[in-house]
Image: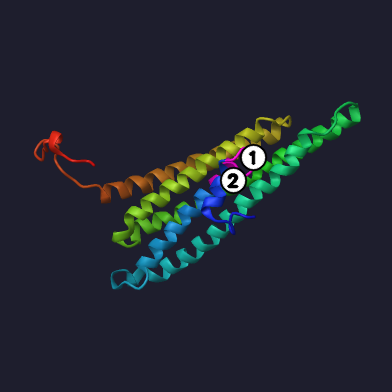
Amino acid sequence: MTSGETTIRTYLERLGARESVPGGGGASALAGAYGVSLGMMVCAFTIGKKTYAEVEPRIRDIEARLAKLREAFLALSDEDEKVFLPLSQAYGLPDSTPEEKDFKETTLETCLSTASMTPIKVMERVCEALDYLGELEAHGSNLMQSDVGVAAAYLGTALEGAVMNVYINTKMMKNQNRMIELNEYARKLLMDGRAKSRLIYEAVEDKVKPQYDPELDRIDRNKVDFS
């Protein structure tokens, strides 16, 4: 059953079970799906409002692009599970003879490279989604800005989770050139996406966080009920 067809509860039960899949890679992709879905909600609440009539065509375009990204994240969550199977099988290949060793090493390198590319694709799509989210922070409904911040947090999680799944695979590679190529590209995506995510999150935080002077507007903390 794919992540796009199962219930949240069923998926989480599988995620928490003693099974190799689904794992962190698939969960990271789903975090991306949550992030873009929240972005779509911001679009939905912005479209049709007179205040935002001037930007409505662009908001509609962003909504459509985020919808495509959501489908991509769901597909990548499933892809993460699919690429793990041949990798796990490759580790079990015989290596008693020189021919078997060569075949096993070649197969492993191919599977590790393939398994690394799935989280990289997640990272690429996160960076794209964050560009759209930045526009929603600037032009989306003011009433939905907290959801923009949550979306940025989800996308940041997707990014940082995905890069872990790049590194765990490239670390096992014997082809140093390919390992360095993948690591450097993943690192670039991480730095770019992390900066975008934090900028959006902090911009939203400045908007929605109540402003007060801690010296002038003191409260009697012992009498505040936080229950």
Residue 120 vs residue 26, the one in the foreground: 26
- Identify residue type, mark 2: Arg
Residue 191 at x, y = what percent? 49, 39
Residue 27 is a magenta residue: yes
Answer with left or right where residue 154 lies relative to residue 213. right
The image shows residue 222, relative to residue 48, as above or below, that is above
Q: Secondary structure at mark 1?
A: loop
Marker disc for residue 14:
2
Residue ID at (71%, 32%) = 173
Q: Earlier in the sequence, mark 2 or mark 1?
A: 2
Q: Are marks 2 and 1 in contact (CB under 8 Å)?
A: yes
The crowding category of the residue bearing disc 2, from other C-alpha atoms within 10 Å (few below 14, some 14 to 19, many at least 20), is some
* Position in image of residue 219 (x %, y %): 12, 38
The residue type indicated by label 1 comes to: Glu
From the viewer's perspective, tell me whether residue 75 is left or right of residue 192: right
Residue 112 sits inside the magenta stretch: no
Q: In which quadrant is the N terminus drawn?
A: bottom right
**Residue 123 visible somewhere in the drawing:** no
Q: Secondary structure at mark 2?
A: helix
Rendering quarter of residue 97: top right
Where are the magenta residues, as a range?
17-28
Q: From the viewer's perspective, is residue 16 above or below residue 101? A: below
Residue 227 horizontal/vertical position (percent): 24, 42
As drawn, which residue projects farthest toward the left? Answer: 216
Q: Badge 1 is on which residue?
A: 19
Residue 67 shows up from this direction: yes
Report whether 149 appears left or right of 78. left
Examine the image and state in which quarter residue 163 appears. Answer: top right
